[in-house]
Amino acid sequence: MNIKEYKNVHFIGIGGISMSALAEILNHRGAYVAGSDFQVTDMTRHLQSVGIKVYKGHAAENITDNTDLVVYNVAIGEDNPERQEAARRGIRQIGRAALIGELMKEYKYSVSVAGTHGKTTTSSMAAEVFMAAETDPTVSIGGILPSIHSNYRLGADDYIILETCEYKDSFLKFNPYCAIVLNIDRDHTDYFKTMEQMHSSFNKFVNKLSGFLIINSEIPHIEKVLEGFDKKVITYGGKDADWQVENVSMEKGLGRYDAYYKGEKFMSVSLSVPGLHNISNSLSVIALCKEFGLSKDAIAEGLKNFKGTGRRFERKGSFNGAEVVDDYAHHPTEIKATLKAAGEMGFDRIVAAFQPHTYTRTRDLFGEFVNALSLADKVYLLDIYAARERDPGNVHSRDLAEELKKAGKNAVYSGSFEKCEEDLRKDLKPGDLFITIGAGPVNKVGEALLNK
C-alpha cells in the first residue's frame, strides 16, 4: 500500500489525539482530508482552522463520491454507518494503527515508544532531544507538546518518533526500526484477560523490530518479552542494567541525576518535569539517543527544554491561592507516580478529583486504585467515564469513596462535575495543590474553577 496514492481521505473519529495528528500529517502532504466526530472540541475546531472539514456525528452521507480511503480507530466497529457506506461503495478502509504502520515504512528510522505508562511523556522527551540535535524528526504523540504547539510535527524522512499503543494489539501493525519498552502492567482488562496474553503481545511486538530494543530491566518476567528476539538489547533501570542512575536529588520535585552507562558516568541531567518516574523515562531517552549518536549537549538541552505535554501534570493556574494541575493518569500505577511527585513539591495539602476511566479497569483494579488514591490528602470521586463501555452495574465511584473512608482517608463522592466544582469552591485554600486526574474530561472541573 502506498499512502501517497490516496488523495481524499476520511477519518472516522477525527477528533482523537492520534487520529487528529494523522489527519494533519496527510493534510500537509497534500491530500484532501475530512472526518467526523461526535463532539465539537478544541481539537476539531483546530482541524477546521487548517482546512480539514469536520462533520459532527457519524452518517453515511459524510462519505462522498471522491473519498478513496477511510481511516477508523479501534472503537469504530463495522456497524458504523460511515464504514458501512464505504463498504457499499467499495472504498478501501484501514485501521489507524495500520495507517501508522504504512507511514513508518517511508522513514529510514522509525522509533516506537511503547509500554502501559509514560508513552506520551517519553516520546515527547525524545522529540525534544531529536529537535535539539537538529535531526528534523517527524513526530506523532498522544498530547500537545508546547514547543511545537501540536501533537504532531512533520519533518524530514530520516526519523519518525511515535507513541505506540498496545490496546487490542494495535502496535502489531507497526513497522518499527527500534523501540523503547517502558513497562508492562495489567491494563485494558476488557481485552488483555491475563498477563500471559499481555507478555505474548509485547513479545510479538519486539520481534517486529529490525534494529534494536531499549527495555526497562525491572519489567517482571522480562524473559517472556525477549523470547526469540535476536537483535541488540539495551537495558535500563535495574541494578544490573546497561543504563543506571546515580546521585539522584530532587529540587521542588524536579529530578537531578547522573546517567551511567556500563558502570561509567555518561552525563549529568537536570529535568524540568517532576517525579522519580520521569527520571526513569528520561534515562530510556538517553539510551535511545546514544544509539543514534546524538551529542550529550543536545540530550541535556532537549531534556531540560521538556516541560511536559498537555494533560501530563499540566499547570493550569491558581484558584483561591491553590495551584491547579491536570493529569491524564488513569491507571493505579500512573496515579501513584503522579501523587508521589505532587507530594514532593512542598504543598500543604494534595487535593485530587478523580474520574475513573472505564468500568472494567475500575472493577478489575479496584484495590490498586484505593491504594494509589490514598496518597492524596483528600479525594473527590466523580462518576466513571464509560468511554467505549456500557455500565455493567457492578462497580461505581461511590464504592471507591466508601473504601477510601474505611481506610481512614478523606474521600467525598461528588458524582457530577458541577457538584465537584461546588464542593471545591468551599474547600480549596492557599497552600493546596489541586489536581484533576483521569483520561476523561475531568480537566473541565479545574478549568471551571479558573474560568469563573
Image (cartoon, rainbow, N blue to C red):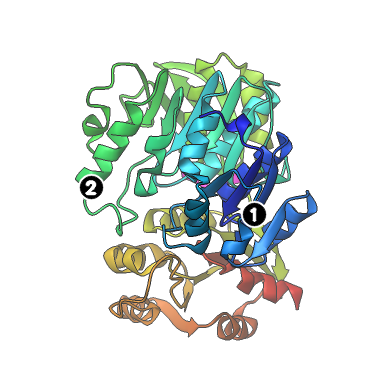
Which quarter of the figure is the C terminus placed in?
A: bottom right
- Nearest the viewer among 106 and 365 is 106
| Magenta-tinted stretch | 273-277
Q: Tag on residue 195?
A: 2
**Label 1 sits on residue:** 64
Seen in the picture, residue 264 relative to 286 is either above or below; the reply is above
Q: Residue at x 63, y 71 (%)?
A: 444
Q: Residue at x 70, y 33 (%)?
A: 29
Mark nearest the camera among 2 and 1 is 1
Q: State whether residue 252 appears in this view.
A: no
Q: Residue at x 59, y 43 (%)?
A: 68
* Tag 2 and tag 1, C-beta contact below 8 Å: no
**Percent x, y of residue 433:** 60, 66
Q: Residue at x 42, y 58 (%)?
A: 77
Describe the element under mark 1 as helix, strand or loop: loop
Q: Residues within 10 Å of mark 1 (few under 14, many from 20)?
A: some
Q: Earlier in the sequence, mark 2 or mark 1?
A: 1
Asked if the magenta segment contains residue 210, the reply would be no
- Nearest the viewer among 59 and 210 is 59
**Percent x, y of residue 437:** 51, 64
Q: State whether residue 137 appears in this view.
A: yes
Q: Quadrant of residue 14?
A: bottom right
- Nearest the viewer among 128 and 441 is 441
